[in-house]
Image (cartoon, helix red, strand yellow):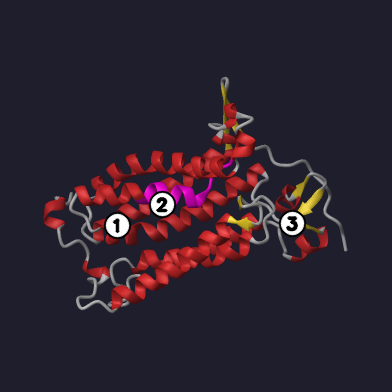
Amino acid sequence: MTLTPILAALNPIAVHLGPIAVHWYGVIIATGVIIAVTLAVREGRKRGINPDDIYDMILWALPAALIAARLYYVVFQWPYYSQHPGEIIAIWDGGIAIYGSLIGAGLVVFFFCRSRFIPVWLMLDVAAPTVILGQAIGRWGNFMNQEAFGRITSLSFLQGLHLPDWIINQMLIDGAYRQPTYLYESTWDLMGFVVLMSLRHYPQLFKQGEVFLAYVMWYAFGRFFIEGMRTDSLMLLGTIRVSQLLSIVLFVGALILVIYRRRQATPPADYLSGNPFRERAKLSN
């Protein structure tokens, strides 16, 4: 087998604007957010949600998601950050947790929707497929930073995955080739996006809230197994992978919610019925 020549790792800095270094990590995350918001606005309009409400919500949700993602990470890495407090805000070097961002953004969505006469479940349904697409894109920020990788593997294994050389070369970290777990998760998320986008417009298939709950189950299921391959997991009590534990809780909890809500005397409205308060939402043309 012909071996891939070892090349230098890709530069994590996209461009320098004077003294400011713009990292690819931030560029990729921002790209994912822009695409997600664009798709959410388009779907929200169809479901009776004012685009301006989505934009307003994002202005609150993005900072909350970023802060919560960083705090989540820092809390579980506190022995390190307690000795390096100056690095707590250095998110441009990586070190944010997706589950933390979802918790932060979820809280904003709940309180924001309650104040704007928008069903919370409906807003979550509109956002869910776009969020998982944003996650799929965002994982490539981890690729550029050479993080979120897995255990040591061989060059022949990576070549067997038919990956291009530029990906294989980037997986040479600290003198050893690594499992591209960021790629596994990105692929899983992209598949979830395709599935949700393909199914959510089928008549009477989803009740309001179930597109979101399907997203939770899809993501949690894949994350549980992918997390087991990683070497940089946040740990609880030194032996329990936090993301695996949370994945189990979220998967089971979402499944129970689907069953419980379906068995209620008055089941939730269909997803396609949209916002019952659409007149109060003052839809823009």
Magenta-drawn stretch contains 97: yes
Task: Give the farthest residue toward the left.
Answer: 279
Of callouts 2 and 1, the N-terminal one? 2
Mark 2 sits on what residue?
A: 36
Q: Quadrant of residue 271?
A: bottom left
Mark 1 sits on what residue?
A: 123
Amino acid type, mark 1: Met
Mark 3 sits on what residue?
A: 151
Q: Which residue: 62% across, 52% down?
A: 237
Q: Is residue 42 left or right of residue 116?
A: right
Q: Alpha-carbon distance for marks 2 and 3?
A: 31 Å
Amino acid type, mark 3: Arg
Of callouts 2 and 3, the N-terminal one? 2
Q: Are marks 3 and 1 in contact (CB under 8 Å)?
A: no
Amino acid type, mark 2: Ala
Q: Nearer the viewer, residue 210 or 184?
A: 210
Q: Which residue: 39% across, 59% down?
A: 128
Estimate how packed mark 2 is, as few (under 14), some (14 to 19) or many (20 or more) residues with alpha carbons within 10 Å.
many
Q: Alpha-carbon distance for marks 2 and 1?
A: 13 Å
Estimate how packed mark 1 is, as few (under 14), some (14 to 19) or many (20 or more) residues with alpha carbons within 10 Å.
many
Q: Nearer the viewer, residue 265 or 240?
A: 240
Label 2's element? helix
Q: Nearer the viewer, mark 2 or mark 3?
A: 3
Task: Work out whether residue 193 can be spotted.
Answer: no
Q: Which residue: 41% across, 68% down?
A: 254
Q: Is residue 179 left or right of residue 156?
A: left
Label 1's element? helix
Q: Alpha-carbon distance for marks 3 and 1?
A: 38 Å
Q: Nearer the viewer, mark 3 or mark 1?
A: 3
Q: State the extent of the magenta-drawn residues as a range.
A: 94-106
